[in-house]
Amino acid sequence: MLGMTLARRLAHADQEVAIWEGAPALGGLASAWSLGDVVWDRHYHVTLASDQALRGLLRELDLEQEIAWVTTRTGFFAGGRLYSLSSIVEYLTFPLLSPLEKARLAATILHASRLRDWRKLERITAVEWLTRLSGRGTVEKVWYPLLRSKLGANADTVSAAFIWAIIARMYGARRSSGKSEQFGYVSGGYARVLDRFAAALAADGVRIETDRRVASVEQSQESELTVTSAEGVTERFDRVVVTAAAPVAARMCPQLSANERSLLEGVEYQGIICASLLLDRPLSPYYITNITEGWVPFTAVIEMSALVDRSTFGGRSLVYLPKYLTPSDPAFARSDEDIEREFLDALARMYPHFDRSLVRSFRISRVRYVLPLSTLGYSDRLPPMHTSVPGLHIVNGAHILNGTLNVNETVQLAERAYLELLADPVAAPLKIANLR
C-alpha cells in the first residue's frame, strides 16, 4: 500500500513510474489469499472512522461509500475465563481490577488521548510510564501481559510512544464514531480494494511488474541506478524508491554509507506468524479478545465474522490467531502442522465448546518484518529517506513516528513522503521497488 500510494501520487505529478513487486500480486501486508473457497485478507485489517488518509484514498477509488460500519464487542481472557469488556457497565464490574485500579486505568487512557508532544514519551519506557499513571497493580494485571503478548522481551524496552500511539488511535476512533467500538470494511475485503487500486494505477500509466523480487540497487558509472532482480533481470532508472523493511533495504543497497547501513539495521522489528481459520460456527461474539494468560501461544483472537457478515464466508466464521515475535525467533522454522496443533490445543482450553471438527480450513502466514518498534530515543536514530547515493530513496514503516503500523498510517506516510521525493533536484523518472 505504501509503494502503490507513492506511485499514484508521483504519477499524478507527471512522473514516469514503475513498480517492482516481489510477490505474485500487489498488496504486501494488505494482500489477500484463499482460505478454502473463501478469498479474504491474509492478515486482519479494519477501517476506523478516524482513518482519514485511508478513507480519502478509498474515496478516490470510488469505494468509500461502500464501507460497512459495524459496532463490535471486545472480550478479555484472563485467569482462565472469558470476560466481556464492551460497555461502561461491564468495565465497572470487571472483577480483576479494584475500583481504584479501574479509575486509574481510565484516567491513563484519557490522559494519553489528550497528549500531543509524543517526543517526550520516547525518553521513558512504556512500562515505567504506565506504572506512573495506572499503578503497579494495573500494569501487572493488564498492561504488561498485553505488552508481553505482542512484544515478548521487547515489552521492557519499547518506549511509551508505542503504547501512546495505540491508545490515541483507538480513542480517536471511538470519538469519531460516537463513543462506540465501530469498525468498517469494504465489501470484498482488500482483494477488491487492491484490484481497484491496480486498475487505477494502470490508468495512471504506472507500469507494474509482479514476481520481480529485488536483489540489489546500485549506481552505475553513468550515474544511473541499476535494479537487479533475484532472477538476474536488470533495469536502469534515474531514481529509485525502496519501500522494503529497513534491514532488508540495507542489504539491497550495498553502496550506502556505513552510518546509513547502521541506522537501517538498528531498527528493531516484530514479525508475525498469523493463522487463519474457517470454522463452522463462531467462537464468541467478540471481534477481538485480548489475552493476558502466558500459556496461550497467540497474542489475541480476532473473529472477523463478528464484523463481516458471515454470508461473505459461506456462513462460516473467519478467525485470526496472531503470534508476534522477533525476526530471528526459531518459531518461524516450525512446521505448519506443529503450529496448528499448538494453536488448536489452546483454543480447546479457552473455549469449552470448541472442537477440531469445526475447522474447515487452517492456513499460516509468516512475515519476519512487520512492525518497527519505537524504542528509547527512536526518532533520533531514524534513517533518512534521502540517501548518500544520488537518486536513491528509502521509505518504509520505520518512518511512521507518531503512530503504529496500519493501512491508514501507511497511506499517510506515502502522502508525506512523495512531496519530499519531488523535492529531490534530480528531475527524472522514479521507480518504486517493493520487496516482500
Image (tube, grey):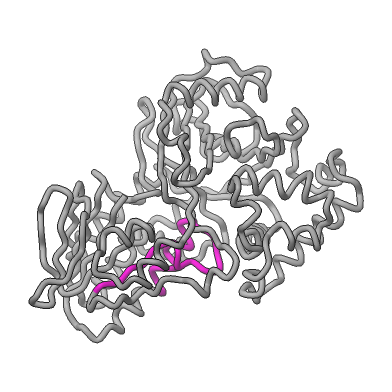
Is 103 included in the stretch rendered in magenta?
A: no
Residue 214, above or below 306: below
Relative side of 260 to 373, left or right: left
Image spot of residue 228 (x, y percent): 15, 58
Viewer-side residue, 166 vs 207: 166
Quarter where residue 252 is shown: bottom left
> Residue at the spot x=21%, y=54% of the render?
215
**Magenta region, residue range:** 392-416
> Residue at the spot x=36%, y=61% of the render?
2
Quarter where residue 206 is shown: bottom left
Q: In which quarter of the image is the N terminus?
A: bottom left
Relative side of 206 to 33, left or right: left
Relative side of 118 to 398, left or right: right
Image spot of residue 152 (x, y percent): 60, 45
Image spot of residue 429 (x, y percent): 17, 74
> Residue at the spot x=28%, y=83% of the render?
424
For the view shown, which residue lies furthest in the left direction?
222
For the view shown, which residue lies furthest in the front direction?
258
Viewer-side residue, 389 vs 80: 389
Viewer-side residue, 347 vs 119: 119
> Residue at the spot x=62%, y=20% of the render?
348
Residue 118, above or below 409: below
Is 413 included in the stretch rendered in magenta?
A: yes
